[in-house]
Amino acid sequence: MSLTRLLFGRPIPNGEEEEERIGSLAGIPVLGLDALASAAYGPEAALTVLLVLGTGGLRYIVPLMLVIVAVLLIVQFSYRQTIAAYPDGGGSYSVARENLGRKSAMLAAAALALDYILNVAVAISAGVGALVSAVPALFPHMLLLCLALLALLTLVNLRGVRTTGLIFMSPTYLFVGCLGVTLLVGMVKVLGAHGSPQPVVQPSPLPAGISSASLWLLAHAFASGCTAMTGVEAVSNGIPIFREPRTHRAQRTLAAIVGILVALLGGVALLSHAYGIGATPPGQEGYQSVLSQLIAAVAGRGAFYYVGIAAIVSVLCLSANTSFADFPRVCRVLALDGYLPAAFAHAGRRMVYSTGIIILSLLSGALLVVFGGVTDHLIPLFAVGALSAFTLSQTGMVLHWRRVGGERARRFIWVNGVGAVTTGVTLCVVAVAKFTEGAWLTLVFIPLAYLLFRATHAHYTRVERVTAANRPMEVGPLSPPVVVVPMKRLDQVTEKGLRFALTISPEVHAVQVRAHPRECGDLAARWKSHVEEPLRSAGLPMPRLVVLDSTYRQLVDPLLGYVRELSAAHPESFIAVIVPELIERRWYHFLLHSHTATLLKMMLLFRGGPRVVVINAPWYLRERRRSAASTSMPPRRSVSSRPSPS
């Protein structure tokens, strides 16, 4: 079994595409991990901001989470209409393209791309943060752990959507189960203790409380907590991966994801307030995540604690899978519209868009390195992209329903209109509150991505215009090409190229560039006996031997100059340069030979001219010389020569 097959699995044929689609049960881990995992870092992000208030900050966490849950429910109801209206994938880009125009669509795509890239970095760093909470000795290795998990996640996603869903299903439902049991037991203890339960393990102490908070601080905490809203749009982007009826399955998956998330966010906020659990300074020794403190306070640090922490770490790390599922599909749509390179639109061996997966992994890895793998450093950049996409999508849906018309459309206009206004206001609050902490970078990234899309589209448009053939093919006088065969010495490698040249043209130029006489074989001395006499006996046209001395020991430039001279002298003919090249059998052979042929081909392509054609003539190690009867020039005698020592 090859290493590629072992790592990525067997190639999936087109006929098995339907088998790779998933149902609602697998849809939750594939498309909902981002949203579900935000229950771990959304409330903690808000509590981190409120840390300056000490114990006084706990009184604000429940009202803040209630506002975020309300916005989340509005977004969910809005996206249900988007799924119904765009069953082929109603992500923000598709909705904006159809209803708001291409400029708005590109802005939506840039915002989505930013959201997905940041989601991978935030999810992995949050997962490692949870692991460090349980095993503090790992703190010095946070960044290395982040990068290792990113590599593993990339490999899993390259194996295909169905495989990913099966792998991620168990940790997803274990996370929901463990956290659900913790919240349920904790609520029972809160009710039994009349709102003042006694923690099994005391949470990290908070400084003395401050009586009141400024509106700016609360807006800041709300902006951080809004990261809990990210990932809701993933289902509308990923509708095509569901089995039929895919619209119904997508809506059911979205409802399940949002329902679970609302319960988790509300429960974490209530128990944090009841048990006096606040955030600890991120990125510092002694860091404890909110969920780590919560599980320890409710159930202690026994077996259940470590199972719960393992589930949280797994889901936080794997929650980046939402981006791996959706980012390549958004890139595919952009590539089909000509806004990204065509490679993004090609499905790989496992029916996934491998280019998008690899690019996402590289960009997220760069973010982790720049920010040291600390979640709180990445949070300020996170929510702007998601909320921008929400707002553009819902605004587009308002225009969609206005165009459709009818009683049903008028009712849905209000749903999407409220969603657009709500997410728009939230976006403004987040952008202002987080601007100085790094949100300004998103205001740089989105326009840059927009300009990249425009430049790519302009390039493809120009290429299509220049290469268009709207007339019959030219069939004027066609003459054989003038063929050039670069030769360092006369051996089996160059002999193969020379033999092929004689089959396509009577005018062949064998060109040797001598950088130094001692570095090349004396080709002229052997030319008559090894080439001219056998060809004359066979009645074949005689190639011309040209030896160019290079004053400055250059190999490529003298040959390029000669090719240009031939092109000027034969304005009606193509100049075909046949490049003999040794092909190594093992990867390490590549290190033992020079690669002048590769450089020559590249320079000919870029500087040779419009009538220069480059042809490869590969010769493989241990290639057997064919008998005269099997050559392309029967029944004439083949060129005979002895390979010169290399």
Image (cartoon, rainbow, N blue to C red):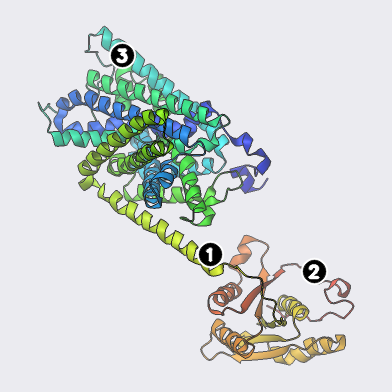
Secondary structure state at the residue bearing disc 1? helix
Up-down relation of residue 606 to residue 126 (above or below): below
Q: Residue at x 71, y 91 (%)?
A: 524
Question: Badge 3, how many Cα within 10 Å: few under 14, some, many 20+?
Answer: some
Kind of residue indicated by mark 3: Met
Looking at the image, tell me whether mark 3 or mark 1 is earlier in sequence order.
Answer: 3
Up-down relation of residue 285 to residue 335 (above or below): above
Residue 221 image position (x, y, % from top left): 22, 34
Looking at the image, tell me whether mark 2 or mark 1 is earlier in sequence order.
Answer: 1
- Find the distance from the CA under tag 3 to the CA under tag 2: 80 Å
Front-most of residues 567 and 295: 567
Q: Answer whether labels 2 and 1 touch (C-beta < 8 Å).
A: no
Q: Is residue 205 visible?
A: no
Looking at the image, tell me whether mark 3 or mark 2 is earlier in sequence order.
Answer: 3
Relative side of 594 to 235, left or right = right
Residue 135 image position (x, y, % from top left): 36, 32
Question: Badge 1, how many Cα within 10 Å: few under 14, some, many 20+?
Answer: few
Quadrant of the drawing holding the N terminus? top right
Residue marked by disc 3: 187
Secondary structure state at the residue bearing disc 2? loop
In this view, the mark in front (3 or 2): 3
Q: Residue at x 35, y 24 (%)?
A: 262
Relative side of 449 to 542, left or right = left
Up-down relation of residue 642 to residue 203 (above or below): below
In this view, the mark in front (3 or 1): 1
Residue 258 image position (x, y, % from top left): 39, 26
Relative side of 401 to 572, left or right = left
Q: Quadrant of residue 303?
A: top left
In this view, the mark in front (2 or 1): 1
Front-most of residues 622 and 31: 31
Residue marked by disc 1: 464
